Image (cartoon, grey):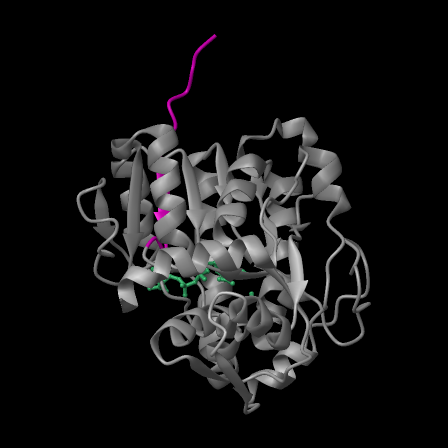
Amino acid sequence: MQIVKEKILVIGACGQIGVELTTELRRIHGANNVIASDLRDEHELLKGTGPYVSCDVMNKEMLHVLIIRHNITQVYLLAAILSATGEKNPSLAWHINMQSLLNVLEIAKEEKLTKVYWPSSIAVFGPSSPKQHTPQNTVIEPTTVYGISKFAGERWCEYYHHHFGIDVRSLRYPGLISYKSAPGGGTTDYAVEIYHEALRDKDYSCFLSEDTYLPMMYMPDAIRATIELMEAPKENITIRSSYNLSAMSFSPKEIAQAIQKHIPEFEMSYREDFRQKIADSWPQSIDDSKAQEDWHWKPRFDLNTMTEDMLRNLKPLYA
Ligand code: NAD
Ligand code: SER
């Protein structure tokens, strides 16, 4: 049997997920087998850890040449405009989120790539979806341009799988919380900012109301879920649009209380802005039983263990 050595391209490698996913992929596949690429300058944490190429995913020719030149077999496409930034510039968000995916899927077809990874989001769900334990298959009527682009992207992934046999896999990430690379313009970013402000100023003004529950996940769980999905046997993958994925659900008031266990003087205030409307359109919790059944997904972090880990890792920054 011929063993195929995978050569991986991560597009959007300098973003919140990209930095940590690239690092983990390099640990698994070897530094030189994982090419990091982004529009931005190379992230500090990636410098010296493996090859970096500056590339605009919207430039299909350039991307195609890059993939051929480096004998790429798998692509992780992380470049996107997130929910809050997307509402400020809907046509740009639609254009980038759709065209980047279509460029990658077309090249995957032409070059017969072995696998493609593209993340979707809980933002595919809208106000008419069930709010609690939102099922895998339910009413999907997103009201943000970000959610519309993610839903359309899911349809394209399934289409390219069914029509052209592309092994494309996807997760509907909840809001992701991390300390290594800053978040990039989402509605769930408050749950990252709050840890920095708690350590720096001992207070935080939250742009969502105190009782806004959203599905959330700590980055180590998100990275592990991504790797586990991508390493699962092909025959286990029964969903080719995108898998619901869940870890925890909390409100701004509850995350503040979790922080106060470590920093009792921390104070939280609330000043809602345009992101409240986006959050109100999303589910409060997610049913991820298909991910559990198909590739045995199980999260490890809850609000308290995540809070301990976030504060421990961020403390030296503000000492
Ligand atoms: P991010 O904004 O932090 O990172 C995206 C990266 O893509 C940035 O480094 C940016 O410079 C790069 N990029 C943008 N346009 C590009 C282009 N034209 N060519 C090349 N690179 C470009 O986003 P993230 O949080 O890391 O999200 C990655 C993916 O995961 C996105 O598809 C996002 O929708 C999805 N997702 C993220 C979350 C979350 O909470 N972070 C939740 C659900 C889904
Ligand atoms: N965390 C993302 C956002 O808020 C959800 O996809 O945009």
Is 108 left or right of 166, judged from the image as shown? Answer: left
The front one of 256 and 3 is 256
When asked about the image quadrant of residue 49, the answer is top left
Residue 229 lies, in percent from the top left, at: 58, 38
Residue depicted at x 44% and y 82% = 203
Question: Can residue 312 be seen here?
Answer: yes
Residue 130 is situated, as x and y percent measured from the top left of the image, at 82, 67
Q: Is residue 288 above or below residue 128?
A: above
- Residue at 60% across, 76% down: 252
Nearest the viewer among 312 and 55 is: 312
Return the x and y of residue 82 as percentages of the image width and height.
49, 70
Number of marks in picture: 0
Q: Quadrant location of residue 258?
A: bottom right
Relative horizontal placement of residue 133, taking residue 86 as reference (left or right)? right
> Is there any visible trace of residue 180 in the rendered image?
no
Please give the range of residues in magenta: 1-13
**Looking at the picture, does residue 285 appear above or below residue 305?**
below
Q: Is residue 178 magenta?
A: no
Residue 300 horizontal side relative to residue 78, left or right:
right
Q: Nearer the viewer, residue 110 or 275?
A: 275
Query: What residue is rendered at 30% in x and 32% in y?
Result: 33
Residue drawn at 75 percent across, 36 percent down: 293
Q: Is residue 7 one of those drawn in magenta?
A: yes
- Magenta span dominant secondary structure: loop
Q: Quadrant of the C terminus?
A: bottom left
Give whichever of 176, 308 is nearer the camera: 308
User: Would you place residue 284 above or below residue 239 in this image?
Assistant: below
Percent position of residue 141, x then y: 74, 71
